[in-house]
Image (cartoon, rainbow, N blue to C red):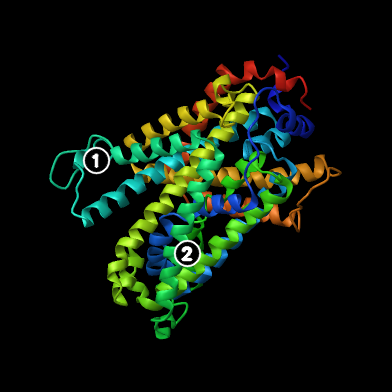
Amino acid sequence: MAGDSLTLRKPLTAILAEAEDGAGPRLGRSLSAVDLVAMGVGATIGAGIFVITGTAAANHAGPGLPLSFVLGGLACALVALCYAELAALVPAPGSTYTYAYATLGELCAWIIGWDLVLEFAVAAATVAVGWSGYVRSLLADLGLHLPAVLTAAPGTSLPGGGTAWFDLPAAAIVLGLTGLLMRGNRASARVNAALVAIKLAIILAFVGLGAAHVDPTLWSPLIPENTGTFGEFGWSGILRGAGVVFFAFLGFETVSTAAAETRHPQRDAPIGLLGSLAVTTVLYVAVATILTGLVPYRELDVADPIAKAMDVIGYGVLSVAIKVGAILGLTTAALTALYGQARVFYAMARDGLLPPVFARVHPGTRVPAASQAVIGAGTALIAVLVPIRILGELVSIGTLFAFGVICAAVLILRRTDPERPRPFRAPWVPVVPILGILTCLALMLGLPGDTWLRLAAWLGLGLVLYFAYGRRRARRVRAGAA
């Protein structure tokens, strides 16, 4: 085995050839640009729009919260432009993992592929735990109550005494969505599109009803004076608010994992990435504007700020619809995260870095069904056992790490393969990717120290698996590596 195999890169020609002419059943190309936009919106707009808008306004930005969402959207746009260039250039399964293999080499590709478990599988588990909470709340409104011991992670203290056993609803939604994804892309795409449409209808209904009742005096001053603490109102509050709401945008990048299953990837992938981000930003700004015009911003630090606003204008009966919207948002977010994880593992298994079972494609549905089943079972296990706070922080740092790699990959490929035709070119390179890297690094540095330790432990486990299994089985790739 070559001593420098860790740094060998997989040529783009080999990646593209596998996507088009790989041996055995290939992933089906059935998704359109509209499907990709729906996927991106479904992945991005979850419970965040129903919760984070209130807490960010009350604690950081005040009525200036729409400005925070604009800044957060611009920060994500830096990364989205880089994703769009790579997804159109390399329409192959694996997303960031595949791009890293082409630019940074085998070891870095493995690290990124292992890191993507935090972005997709752990994200799906996080969303499932949130879904469980909203479902319990909705059922309670209807007079139905699940046994408390079956609604939280093991060891969680219960209000009436005792501790929980496991989170049964969280496991149920993961396994149900896994079954749907194993049926094929068209079935899951139709369900996702329908749920996204209902979710958007609920959000637009809030904006439409609320617009007729806003009190413009609540928007003055637009940026309240700073309290003397950085990040609590004033322009520093707008900036801190942008950091907080940045995580509400996470999910749009799932679109890049579907590039290989798109009818016209060079055109549709950039449309899906940038289109879903644009729709999401507009919706977030609209909701934040209406919300702060209905309720004094200091009163919005509640778990259900939109439902509170509905009470203010006399539409409290719609609070159930708001919870339904949150549940649908979480459902589509979990669906797309599970989808993305299966495609990453499929790409890694084709390269020999994971067992072959993850690369098997069902001849009928043309999806990696075995991979999807294993991932679904593992994600369900995480969802029932691990508290949501730990899961959420791991998702954030893992996603930002992957975002930084994407921006670096654009810089490297522009230098190492400048003549290759690019159906979509990110503008203002190298400024855009460099700003993207710095933004991701700044947000990562703002996360707690124990989150960094968990990331290091996770990547350390990944390295053990790589040297024990993947490195010895990637010879087929190295034979044609650069």
Tell me the residue at 74%/54% (across/down). Answer: 426
Q: Quadrant of the N terminus?
A: top right
Mark with earlier residue (2, 1) = 1
**Residue 357 versus residue 418: which sits nearer the camera?**
357
Q: Is residue 67 left or right of residue 165?
A: right
Query: Farthest top residue?
Result: 1
Could you say whether the residue bearing mark 1 is in a helix, strand or loop?
Answer: loop
Query: Farthest bottom residue?
Result: 217
Quarter of image, res 342 = top right
Q: Which mark is residue 241?
A: 2
Q: Is residue 322 above or below residue 86?
A: below
Q: Position of residue 99 (x, y in %)?
A: 68, 38
Q: Amino acid at mark 1?
A: Thr
Q: Position of residue 167 (x, y in %)?
A: 29, 38
**Label 1: how many Cα within 10 Å (few below 14, some 14–19, many 20+):** some
Mark yes or no: residue 226 visible.
no
Does the CB distance between marks 2 and 1 fall below 8 Å?
no
Q: Is residue 452 above or below residue 107?
A: below
Q: Is residue 293 left or right of residue 16?
A: left
Q: Closer to us: mark 2 or mark 1?
A: 1
Tell me the residue at 53%/55% (across/down). Answer: 41
The residue indicated by pointer 1 is 156
Q: Is residue 345 left or right of residue 58?
A: right
